Image: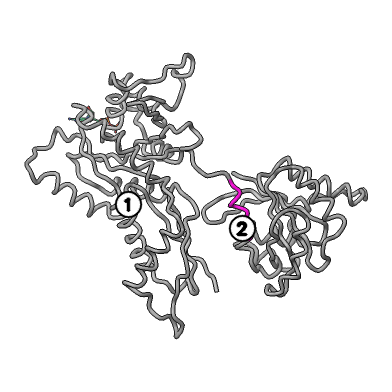
Amino acid sequence: KPVVAIVGRPNVGKSTLFNRLAGRRKAIVEDMPGITRDRLYESAEWLGREFMIIDTGGIRFDDGELFAREVKWQAQLAIDEADVIVFVVDTKDGVTHEDEQVASILRKSQKPVVLAANKVENFDKQLEFYEFYNLGLGEPIPVSAMHGRNTNDLLDAIIAHFAPQSAYQEDEDAIKIAIVGRPNVGKSSLVNSLLGEERVIVSDVPGTTRDAIDTPFKFDGNQYILIDTAGIRKKSRIKEPAERYSVVRSLKSVERADVVIIMLDATAGVNEQDQRIAGYVHEQGKANIIVVNKWDLVEKDEYTMNKFDKEIREDLKFISYSPILYVSALTKKRIYKILELADFVAEQHHRRISTSELNKVISEAMLLNPLPGGGGRRLKIYYCTQVRTAPPTFVLFANNPEQIHFSYLRYLENTLRSNFGFEGTPISLILRKRE
Ligand code: GDP
């Protein structure tokens, strides 16, 4: 998790801002008189990005240390520990000598700094905070920590500095694949069929393979990592029925995956457990493929696949965006297709749409199917922007977000899908208020 540190002179409002940013839900309770808690670290979240937040102001010297040293020490701590530094200044005081000292330390550090100009009363009076440009730390963001005003913009600026969040990019482009499904659908068989193939090159680094949980391999020049295969592979070697590859364990592997293969048994149909597993994958925001195994056991005619498609779509409505593939782990029919599709859905998962393209599509959709008026006041969505990938996440700025019906969001999601694809990946739409 990225770490965000708040620095600044005493009384500029660091702790108030800390409480605003960290315990957004708890803030109301904590603001009540008589409840004081000294927290140095707290976890926070904004637009799906989680981070740790440190209030360096909570660190005090009780032996009356010189103030200047305290502030410098704070700044140093922030530089050492944090990924992003929030430097709080007070618009009531203007730029002080101490502010300049801290700014100079921060500028030298090369760390991303977000400058928060606190205690702004009138957000239209730009003169109030424009002098803070002189600190050489970029644009000051006016906020009122006390009243929680404009902290959204501050949070936007903070998370904009975070490294892109994706295991996909970390691991030299290897696609991490997890296979989930209830017992006996054929997960182990698939893993062994895949890895046992000549065309699949399993990296055999001495000393690592035996205990490794994951199995890296190459196919057609592409790199893949099968997640948590240790249990699966062992099981098939030492035929021990007691050592079932549990559903819980396979769900754990989802967290680390880019692409999840949701495996079904063609001879068994979709049951409640399959639905729960698929639901979990969807909620985790993972790219996924529905793989129907044991296709060799099904008596087929020209309608069979269609019939299966229909049933699966009906039973797994919430992942209607996922491709369906019919395979046999036993005869190896179409198992390589799984890897091709994994490449494809991983790409969709990391897809980024430009703001101009997005807004063109969204405004067309709104013309075609306008938002209803809300309580005398017309509902409006002003603009839309993609804030992250994996899964693609879009923020829609609206005048009255709480009045926009869920079904309208679904309409917009369908519009995005029919324009841009996004096959095999969940996408997320977040409404945000903007006057
Ligand atoms: P897991 O519990 O999901 O890992 O399932 P296994 O891989 O252990 O498979 C369960 C049973 O189904 C075993 O007896 C396999 O031999 C069998 N099986 C797996 N895949 C196929 C397939 O594609 N076709 C057929 N006919 N049997 C399969």
State the image coordinates of residue 270 (x, y, percent, origin top left): 23, 46
Q: At 35% from the left edge and 75% from the top edge, which residue is drawn?
A: 370
Q: On the rendered structure, is 393 left or right of 1?
A: left
Q: Identity of the amino acid at label 2?
A: Leu
State the image coordinates of residue 211 (x, y, percent, origin top left): 46, 20
Q: On the rendered structure, is 88 left or right of 201?
A: right
Q: Nearer the viewer, residue 138 or 245?
A: 138
Residue at disc 1, secondary structure? loop
Q: At 39% from the left edge and 68% from the top edge, which residue is drawn?
A: 363
The residue positioned farthest toward the bottom in the image shown = 376
Tag on residue 421? 1
Q: Which residue is mark 2?
A: 155
Q: At 24% from the left edge and 52% from the top edge, which residue is drawn?
A: 315
Q: Earlier in the sequence, mark 2 or mark 1?
A: 2
Q: Nearer the viewer, residue 350 or 232?
A: 350
Magenta residues, start to end: 154-162
Q: Residues within 10 Å of mark 1 (few under 14, many from 20)?
A: some
Q: On the rendered structure, is 409 left or right of 316?
A: right
Classify the position of the C terminus by image quarter.
bottom right
Q: Identity of the amino acid at label 1?
A: Gly
Residue at disc 2, secondary structure? helix
